[in-house]
Amino acid sequence: MLFVWSYWKTIFTLPMNPSKEFHLSYADKELLEREPRGEVQQDVLRRAAKDLPIYTRTMSGAIRYCDRCQLVKPDRCHHCSVCDKCILKMDHHCPWVNNCVGFSNYKFFLLFLAYSLLYCIFIAATDLQYFIKFWTNGLPDTQAKFHIMFLFFAATMFSVSLSSLFGYHCWLVSKNKSTLEAFRAPIFRHGTDKNGFSLGFSKNLKQVFGDEKKYLLLPVFTSLGDGCSFPTCLVNQDTEQASTPAGLNSTAKNESHLFPAKPLRDSQSHLLTDTQSWTEISANTEKGKVGMSNPALAMENET
């Protein structure tokens, strides 16, 4: 029952799309279409994304924009070429369920893998004794014995493939990554950070399965957040953005902007010991940037 329930929810749960706040206004769309210069286009996108909780960038440092959906992409959002729409926290498009696996149904997909694996192991285990009798001629000589052999081989092969796939996605959950992010790490303003969204094993698990234990193993939506913004392990967020994504604690909001934006795990000890050295590093970094061209002027449309 749990296997069928989770499979049903994975198939028929519609993927979530970015909210209307991420869509460009009609005037901005017209300006983007008329303006051929990349720097002006980026100015339009920066202005549109000013109050949005967006902290990831393209490889060139530009605002992530989907020209097909005509919207500013939220963090961890990607355009699915099969569904032809932007999917929040997109993991992959699964042909086995004929649906995009993303923020709205990722928990259901994990439970579907878990219950299908348990189901196949149960079938293989209960069929094993009859499979042994098949080779020792302990079964009646009827066509039914070939059904037993086929059932054992099918259950065993699916168990092997499902165990590897389920194990891989368990690793992704523990690191707070999607399949796409595992192949291409997210890019922040300070650079690429493959663990930028990882908050520790416990919090990573809660972000997918929620904090209510009674619903942990049931295909009921309990994932935390809205799918448009995610807490990160960065010391400082993008200074150009005014808002803070849901889930950040109050200490992150009140932190001074003297320190450069670096991953928390790299800079935590320095924050506790030597504040002046961070100030000097920040000042030297700003001096080095004088006279340099801005790499974010060229807009890069990702699909």
Image: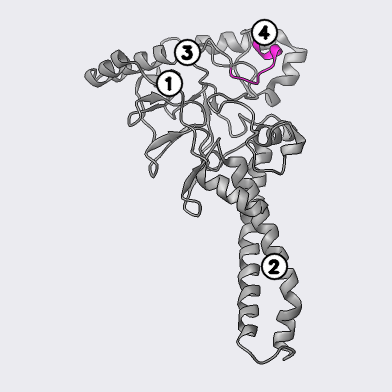
Q: Please, is residue 22 above or below residue 223 in the view?
A: above
Q: Secondary structure at mark 1?
A: helix
Quarter location, residue 60:
top left
Q: Are marks 1 and 2 in contact (CB under 8 Å)?
A: no
Give the distance between the C-alpha atoms of the residues marked 1 and 3, in whole angstroms. 35 Å
Pointer 2: what residue? 123
Quarter location, residue 285:
top right
Which quadrant does the N terminus fall into? Answer: bottom right
Pointer 4: what residue? 254
Pointer 3: what residue? 289
Return the disc, 3 or 2, that comes first in the chain's sequence.
2
Return the disc, 1 or 2, that comes first in the chain's sequence.
1
Res 78 visible: yes
Kindly identify the residue that appears in the image at 60 percent across and 38 percent down: 177
Q: How many marks?
A: 4
Give the distance between the C-alpha atoms of the residues marked 3 and 2, in whole angstroms. 64 Å
Q: Secondary structure at mark 3?
A: helix
Kindly identify the residue that appears in the image at 65 percent across and 63 percent down: 159
Return the disc, 1 or 3, that comes first in the chain's sequence.
1
Q: From the viewer's perspective, is 177 left or right of 302? A: right
Q: Are marks 1 and 3 in contact (CB under 8 Å)?
A: no
Q: Position of residue 263 (x, y in %)?
A: 64, 24
What span is in magenta?
245-255
Task: Please say whether residue 77 is one of the residues in the magenta stretch.
Answer: no
Q: Amino acid at mark 2?
A: Ile
Foreground mark, 4 or 2, reads: 2
Q: In terms of depth relative to the viewer, which is nearer, 142 or 104?
A: 142
Pointer 1: what residue? 20
